[in-house]
Image: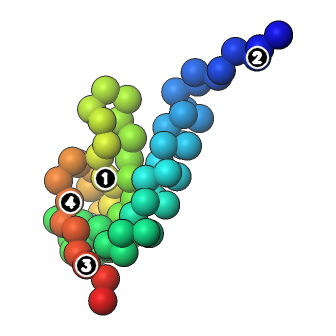
Amino acid sequence: MVKPISNDPESFDELETKILEHNLERTGKSLICPQCGSNNVTYYMGLKLGVQYQCKDCDYIGSFIIEEEKL
Ligand SMILES: [Zn+2]
């Protein structure tokens, strides 16, 4: 018996976000909010919109983000 794979969108999004955050750490880039300039930005998974970003400081959510190389 093979257990069915959970297709609960919420847990899937959470996993996807973790993978993306891990990739971001490896590339060494910071995400900068285009609205307030904060780097307190995380990935925000929209189910049909694809990857978007969310600023924790001003609650900006959108697909446009500024990527900055970490020095
Ligand atoms: Zn912001």
Mark carried by residue 3: 2
Residue shown at the point (25%, 78%) measured from the top left: 69
Q: Amino acid at mark 4?
A: Ile
Q: CA distance from mark 1 to mark 3?
A: 17 Å
Between discs 1 and 3, the one toward the N terminus: 1
Mark whose residue sits in front, 1 or 3: 3
* Residue marked by disc 4: 65
**Residue farthest to the bottom?**
71
Q: Earlier in the sequence, mark 1 or mark 4?
A: 1
Nearer-N-terminus badge (1/2)? 2
Q: Is residue 56 visible?
A: no
Residue position marked by numbered label 3 in the rendering = 69
Looking at the rendered structure, the kind of residue marked 2 is Lys
3D distance between C-alphas at marks 2 and 4: 39 Å
User: Could you tell me if residue 51 is visible in this image?
Assistant: yes
Residue at 48% across, 43% down: 16
What residue sits 64% from the left and 22% below the top? 6
Q: Confirm or reject: label 4 Cβ below 8 Å from ligand 1.
A: no
Residue at 76%, 16% (x, y): give it. Answer: 3
User: Disc 2 and disc 3: Cα gap in Å?
Assistant: 42 Å
Q: Nearer the viewer, mark 3 or mark 4?
A: 3
Would you say 8 lies left or right of 69 here?
A: right
Disc 1/disc 4 C-alpha distance (Å)? 7 Å
Between marks 3 and 4, how big is the CA–CA gap? Answer: 13 Å
| Residue 54, x across and y down, in percent | 34, 54
Q: Quadrant of the N terminus?
A: top right
Q: Earlier in the sequence, mark 2 or mark 4?
A: 2
Q: Secondary structure at mark 2?
A: loop
